[in-house]
Image: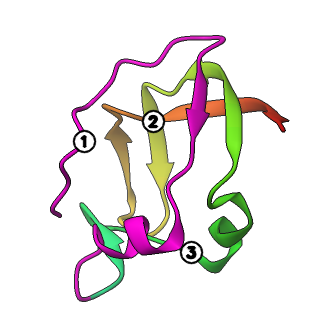
Amino acid sequence: MSSSRKPVRLIHGDLVDVCSAEEIAATLDENGSVAGLPFMPEMLDSLGKRYRVHRRVEHFRSTVMSCVAKSRRCVRSQTMTS
């Protein structure tokens, strides 16, 4: 993964802009994944949009990796803003 963006600790209420398709594609490996987690077609609708952070995600279950993983930069969005 190559990214010039610094990790940010997002908190409830922060606004986040989801990267464009080109920006996301630049971070994916040859399998279309980042750190073993795939970019999935249902994520396409979120590209280029703005969301408000609802809460931080500390752990998540990955059916792809068959494990429970600790999250460093994952949040759950609450609402989309225009």
Q: Measure how far apart labels 1 and 2 are at the Cα level.
A: 15 Å
Rendered image quadrant of residue 51:
top right
Please give the name of the residue rendered at 68% of the width and 40% of the height, measured from the top-left corner.
50
Of callouts 3 and 1, which one flags the residue occurring earlier in the amino acid sequence?
A: 1
Q: Which residues are magenta?
A: 1-30
Quadrant in the picture for the N terminus: bottom left
> In this rendering, is residue 28 above or below 72?
below
Residue 18 point in image, percent of width and height: 56, 49
Residue under label 2: 74
Q: Position of residue 36 (x, y in %)?
A: 28, 67
Q: In the image, what residue type sits under mark 3?
A: Met
Camera-side mark, 3 or 1: 1
Tell me the quarter of the image containing the C terminus.
top right
> For the residues carrying marks 1 and 2, which lies nearer the camera in this image?
1
Q: Amino acid at mark 1?
A: Arg
Q: The residue tagged with tag 1: helix, strand or loop? A: loop
Image location of residue 20, percent across then percent down: 52, 64
User: Which sits earlier in the primary sequence, circle 3 or circle 2?
Assistant: 3
At 69% from the left and 58% from the top, the residue drawn is 46
Tell me which amino acid carries mark 2.
Cys
On residue 5, the disc is 1
User: Which residue matches tag 3?
Assistant: 40
